């Protein structure tokens, strides 16, 4: 396998949640691999801009709420207007929300479903037409080990269910879109050092359980997730579709 199969020269990628955490690490990795980028999130992050400029990235940041029904079509059209193609869609934007199920009200449930499931479906749906017209495309969904197991000690039934839905959407759309030359895969990260898990810094009990439950004994780094995402979005994974790649330091082995 040639190393060039891991490159993305000439390709255009749209990354939701590209302003921090796993999304930003992916943007930096993709830029280094030669891709042009459209990054979307609700807030612009000046530090992200600095890092991307330093890396010489060809990118544009578009402020957008992914849960707005008009956002997917608007962002995909912006990508086509700017770069003429949509080769890669990374559905990375997501939220976590912990809490006992009896107290988890409808507003929180709806926010979880619209952010972690509905907008992923809409972005993927809107990506099909341009990818089909090109005869190729890759969709990468960021799922979670929480879509595979019921984590402890935190209670998060809605989050777990949302990520299981992402995994099943991945498999279903992989089967449906293969004939168009579109591959659809998911990454299922374990505990990664981002804002989403910053409770690890304040909650000793959760930090202890999460670390002890990980055979490798540490959190993953966003860059390690970006490497796995690069693999799944590059020609190097040309025969992978419908895959849910677990990258969790061994967490789900226990
Ligand atoms: P962060 O909280 O650091 O980043 C979340 C990203 O999603 C931000 O860029 C945020 O931008 C964006 N986002 C959230 N809601 C919206 C919205 N409504 N519209 C647009 N963008 C939105 O978390 P991570 O980087 O850790 O998370 C990335 C993905 O990885 C998520 O899907 C998460 O579930 C998944 N994951 C993370 C794990 C971890 O341990 N960190 C483990 C397993 C999965 P903004 O707020 O500016 O809109």
Image (spheres, rainbow, N blue to C red):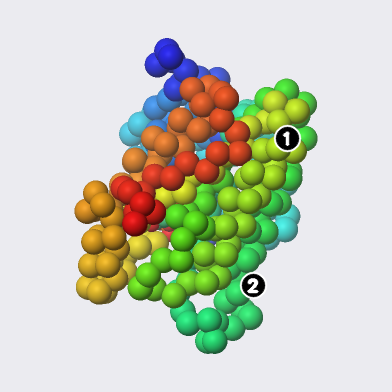
- Residue drawn at x 43%, y 14% is 1
Query: Which residue does the numbered mark 1 point to in the structure image?
Result: 177
Label 2 vs label 1, nearer the camera: 1
For residue 193, side relative to residue 217 (left or right): right
For residue 223, side relative to residue 57 (left or right): left
- Residue drawn at x 39%, y 62% is 196
Find the distance from the CA under tag 2 to the CA under tag 1. Answer: 28 Å
The furthest residue to the front: 254
Query: Which residue does the numbered mark 2 point to in the structure image?
Result: 110
- Numbered circle sitting on residue 119: none
- Residue drawn at x 57%, y 57% is 164
Mark 2: give few (<14), some (14-19) or many (20+) Cα within 10 Å.
few
Residue 188 placed where, x, y %?
47, 49
Residue 28 placed where, x, y %?
40, 36
Q: Secondary structure at mark 1?
A: helix
Q: How many marks?
A: 2
Relative height, residue 47 to residue 147 (above, below): above
Residue 67 placed where, x, y %?
64, 60
Q: Secondary structure at mark 2?
A: helix
Residue 248 placed where, x, y %?
36, 49
Regarding residue 66, the answer to whether it shows in the image is no
The furthest residue to the top: 2
Q: Are marks 2 and 1 in contact (CB under 8 Å)?
A: no
Q: Specify which label sits upstream in the sequence, 2 or 1.
A: 2
Q: Nearer the viewer, residue 130 or 71?
A: 130
Q: Nearer the viewer, residue 106 or 17?
A: 106
């Amino acid at each position: 396998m040639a190393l060039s199969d891991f490159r993305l020269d000439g390709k255009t990628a749209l990354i939701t949640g590209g302003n921090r955490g796993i999304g930003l690490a992916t943007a930096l990795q993709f830029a280094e691999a030669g891709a042009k980028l459209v990054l979307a999130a609700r807030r612009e992050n000046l530090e992200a801009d600095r890092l991307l400029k330093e890396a010489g990235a060809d990118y544009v940041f578009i402020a957008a709420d992914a849960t707005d029904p008009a956002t997917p079509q608007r962002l995909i059209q912006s990508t086509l207007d700017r770069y003429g193609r949509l080769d890669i869609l990374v559905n990375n934007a997501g939220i976590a929300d912990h809490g006992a199920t009896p107290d988890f009200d409808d507003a929180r449930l709806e926010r979880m479903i619209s952010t972690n499931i509905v907008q992923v479906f809409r972005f993927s749906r809107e990506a099909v037409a341009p990818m089909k017209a090109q005869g190729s495309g890759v969709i990468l969904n960021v799922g979670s080990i929480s879509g595979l197991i019921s984590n402890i000690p935190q209670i998060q039934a809605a989050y777990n269910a949302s990520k299981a839905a992402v995994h099943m959407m991945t498999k279903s759309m992989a089967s449906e879109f293969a004939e168009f030359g579109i591959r659809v895969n998911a990454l299922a990260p374990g505990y990664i050092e981002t804002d989403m898990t910053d409770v690890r810094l304040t909650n000793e009990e959760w930090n202890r359980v999460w670390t002890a439950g990980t055979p490798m004994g540490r959190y993953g780094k966003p860059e390690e997730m970006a490497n796995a995402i690069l693999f799944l979005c590059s020609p190097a994974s040309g025969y992978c579709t419908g895959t849910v790649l677990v990258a969790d330091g061994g967490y789900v082995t226990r």
